[in-house]
Amino acid sequence: MLKELWRKTVGHAGQTARNEAQNRQIRLLPHITHTGEYHLDRLTRLLTNRYGMALEANGDDAILQLIRNAARVQDKDVQRELLLFYLNCSPIIQDYLRSGEVVGDDHFLSRR
């Protein structure tokens, strides 16, 4: 009975907040931690050294391009760095990545 009450109140509010995060475009740079920045740098180095990827944008667009490319590559080192970035970034960025807009619905980050 308490679980049902919780689902109706808090669970619904959590879904609403998640849907709002999906519907609005967020800025990534203000929410990146020092450790997240470190893993993004490592991810950038891996993708440029192994696959010759060059970033065509700046700021948030470059980060999104980097994450989209990393999500498509089936290299264990790249996937490890992407996962480490995900685990060390803020909950706002985690929700945004799980929304499926960036990495797609079939990626392991978007599964709940």
Image (cartoon, rainbow, N blue to C red):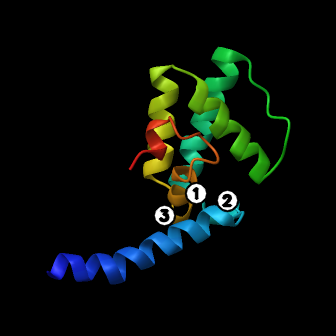
Q: Which residue, given by chain and number where applicable, does mark 3 sit on?
A: 91
Mark 1 or mark 2, whichever is nearer to me: 1
Along the viewing direction, whichever of 23 and 69 lies nearer the viewer: 23
Q: Mark 3: which secondary structure?
A: helix
Marks 3 and 2, the one that precedes in the sequence: 2
Disc 1 marks which amino acid? Answer: Tyr
> Residue under circle 1?
96
Q: CA distance from mark 1 to mark 2?
A: 9 Å
Can you tell which of label 1 and label 3 is closer to the viewer?
A: 1
- The residue shown at (55%, 53%) is 99
Residue 28 picture quarter: bottom right
Mark 1 near mark 2, Cβ–Cβ under 8 Å? yes
Compared to residue 53, the image places residue 34 above or below, namely below
- Residue 76: image quadrant is top left
The quarter in which the N terminus is drawn is bottom left
Residue beneath disc 2: 28
At mark 2, the secondary structure is loop
Which amino acid type corresponds to the residue marked 2 in the rendered image?
A: Leu
User: Percent from the top left, x then y, of residue 24?
Assistant: 69, 67
Front-most of 33 and 66? 66
Mark 1 to mark 3: distance in Å? 8 Å
Q: Quadrant of residue 62?
A: top right
44 or 72: nearer the viewer: 72
Disc 1 packing (10 Å; few <14; some 14–19; many ≥20) = many
Mark 2 or mark 1, which is nearer the start of the sequence?
2
Amino acid type indicated by mark 3: Pro
Q: Nearer the viewer, residue 56 or 12?
A: 12
